Image: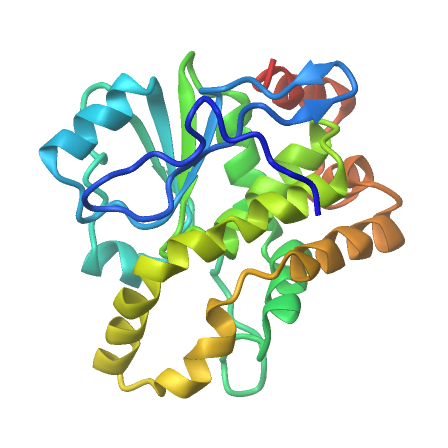
Amino acid sequence: MHELKLEPPRHIPLDGAHNVRDLGGYSTPTGETRWGAFFRADSLHQLSDADVQALLDAGIRTVIDLRHDGEVKAAPNRLAGLPEVNYHHLPLFRVMVGSNGTMPPDLRSIYLHIVDDCQEGLRETFSAIRTAPEGGVLFHCSAGKDRTGVVAALLLRLAGVDEEVIAADYGLTTQAMKTLRPVLVAQAVVRGGNPDELEPMLSSRPEDMQALLDYLTLKYGSVEGYFQQQLGMDADQLYQLRQRFS
């Protein structure tokens, strides 16, 4: 497993969020991903005033909320409505799959569902990133692991970051789960869920993200092929996305 560069601080410690991380400092064919360009995060509904200021001080000026309508209504994003922030609510999950309307039963299937069946949300997300004003872009879901992890993986691979590094970055959520897990389990219990059934969904094993990257190469030839074939982005638009990391 690759040793990931953690300085400047990759993880941003906050009182009201557990999994906010900078995607800078990863090697690419032309250098490194820029610190302060992209941030991945879990839910931001419990941010303190000091947390909000810390994120603004980090340069974040665009926020993309990947959660579905029910999640946003139950836990509104504290950065939404701030004059300094361009807030976009762009849910990835808009149509559930399966005869009973449920999500796929395991993480690998969920990740394939996102890239194969959630193109509308992904297309809007990457368009918002590509056209965002100057400043850092933060994207997030509830745990900052699955929907957020797929968007992060696509961005990093498009920038030319090695797949093993992308999988290792995904695996960093394991540390955040030490504090996130009880929160997510409690939320599931309130909704009538079974904590034992939830547990496998809370993992962040690098091999699960590697499986998605392998799938993209097998089915589309490359991540560029995926962006072009499934999201309808041309070479100029892909260049604009890559430039956000420069």
Left or right, residue 95 beside residue 207: left
Where does residue 53 sit, x and y in percent of width and height? 18, 24
Against 103, residue 214 (above or below) is: above
* Image quarter of the C terminus: top right
Left or right, residue 106 beside residue 236: left
How many tags in the picture?
A: 0
Quadrant of the image occupied by residue 135: top left
Q: Nearer the viewer, residue 54 or 212?
A: 54
Against 157, residue 74 (above or below) is: below
Left or right, residue 153 beside residue 158: left
Where does residue 163 sit, x and y in percent of width and height? 75, 42
Against 219, residue 29 (above or below) is: above
Q: Residue at x 51, y 76 (%)?
A: 200
Where does residue 112 sit, x and y in percent of width and height? 68, 62
Q: Residue at x 42, y 48 (%)?
A: 66
Quadrant of the image occupied by residue 51: top left
Left or right, residue 22 beside residue 109: left
Q: Nearer the viewer, residue 146 or 120?
A: 146
Quadrant of the image occupied by residue 243: top right
Q: Residue at x 48, y 57 (%)?
A: 174
Q: Residue at x 56, y 34 (%)?
A: 126
Kindly give the residue lying farthest to the left in the view shown: 49
The colour scheme used here is: rainbow
Q: Nearer the viewer, residue 242 or 68?
A: 242
Where does residue 169 sit, x and y in percent of width and height? 58, 43
